[in-house]
Amino acid sequence: MRAVKKKRVPPQEIDMTPYVDVIMLILTFFILTAQFKAELAEDIQVQLPSSGNDTTKLPERNVMTLVVNKFGDIFVDVDNINVREDVIGDAIGLAAYHPDSTTQPGWTNPANLNEKGELKRPIVAFNDREKFKKLLIDFRLSSKNITGKDLRIVVKGDKDADIGTIQDLMDILKETKNTRFSFVTDLEQGNKE
Amino acid sequence: MASVGDTGGQEQRGRKVQKWNKRKRIGFHIDMTPYVDVIMLLLTFFIMTTTLNQPQVMQINLPKGDDADKVKVDMGNVVFIRVSEKGNIGLSKGKSDGTEEQPIKVNLEQMRNYLEGWGKQNPDLIMILKFHRKAKYDLMISVLDEINKADIEKRYSFSKIEEPDLKVLEVIGG
């Protein structure tokens, strides 16, 4: 009796259409908000210091990122691939400079740079302060030519970086007339304010 | 035999088949499962790769650095903030005669309170930041952050640490 009844009930099919609709909406949202950058942040790991008072967000486009790691290396990257190609002749190259001549650059050992211990992008090393200054100026000019917009400069320093390296970098920025820049920080958790 | 040869019967049968086909097409049904699978994969990918929290930035404006920009300041308006290699913060106020008061050893919170107090007394307060080269960047950001939080005019400049500064810092324990 029961078996007969079961046979009569048509196989239950769930209508997936509304489900798919919602998923498509979410998908569209994520596709639209996704930003693809040359993943510098992934390549060179730094522990950002935290601060509680900064309301400005990191600019999204036309950014020159200066990463200072705890070994005292400075890496320069521009988000526009054409600018990189134009200035350092390598579309995925990463310019690096070690201002302190008394210590070894940290990038000689890839294990210093990130957890994986490998860097996907080739490092273009600059050993000379004047050449490095020229590089910063070239980046700015090239970006202005290619995108028509001014580069915005952000400094991403590691918590444990020496202030000396940051000061050297600030001197270089000042000498190259880049007097407006920002320090990237993490928003402080549990901010008292 | 008759039924097979009977054209009329065949016709009827053909019509019947057509009708049945048509009805089946009305109930046309696509299996959405692979479609949903692919969409879910894409969705997962985009969720994973999206960075929703953009980091914050702290805006810094350096002076242009031309010689013409150099300004003479009254030492009475100056506050020196010195940070030693060990991370101690020494706060000392300049006097109008060019000397400065004894440094006070402060933590970040105390520094902000002092600065707020002095800033209220003297709106022309200028802070001169001298960081030891070996001090950590984290501390520099914290000091800048406290200055930004303090309810005063944000006028500060970075300056190199020199021998006399190190001597001053020795007073508060290096």
Image (spheres, rainbow, N blue to C red):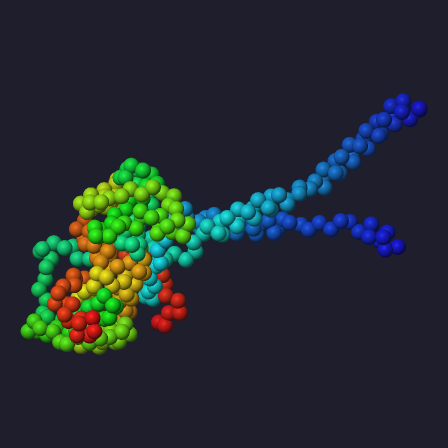
Q: Quadrant of the N terminus of chain A?
A: bottom right
Residue at position x 56%, y 48% in the image:
B40
Identify the residue at the far left of this view: B97
Q: Is residue A75 left or right of residue B37?
A: left
Residue at position x 19%, y 47% in the image:
A129
Q: Is residue B156 above or below residue A169?
A: below
Is any atom of residue B47 visible in this view?
Answer: yes
Residue at position x 81%, y 29% in the image:
B14
In this rendered view, identify the residue nearer to me: B18 or A154: A154
Q: Please identify the quarter of the rendering in which residue B124 is found.
A: bottom left
In this rendered view, identify the residue nearer to me: A103 or A153: A103
Count the labels in the image. Answer: 0
x and y, in percent, of residue B156 in the image: 19, 65
x and y, in percent, of residue A50 in the image: 34, 63
Is any atom of residue A30 visible in this view?
Answer: no
x and y, in percent, of residue B73 in the image: 10, 67
Q: Quadrant of the C terminus of chain A?
A: bottom left
x and y, in percent, of residue B160 in the image: 16, 61
In this rendered view, identify the residue nearer to me: B21 or B147: B147
Residue at position x 30%, y 63% in the image:
B138
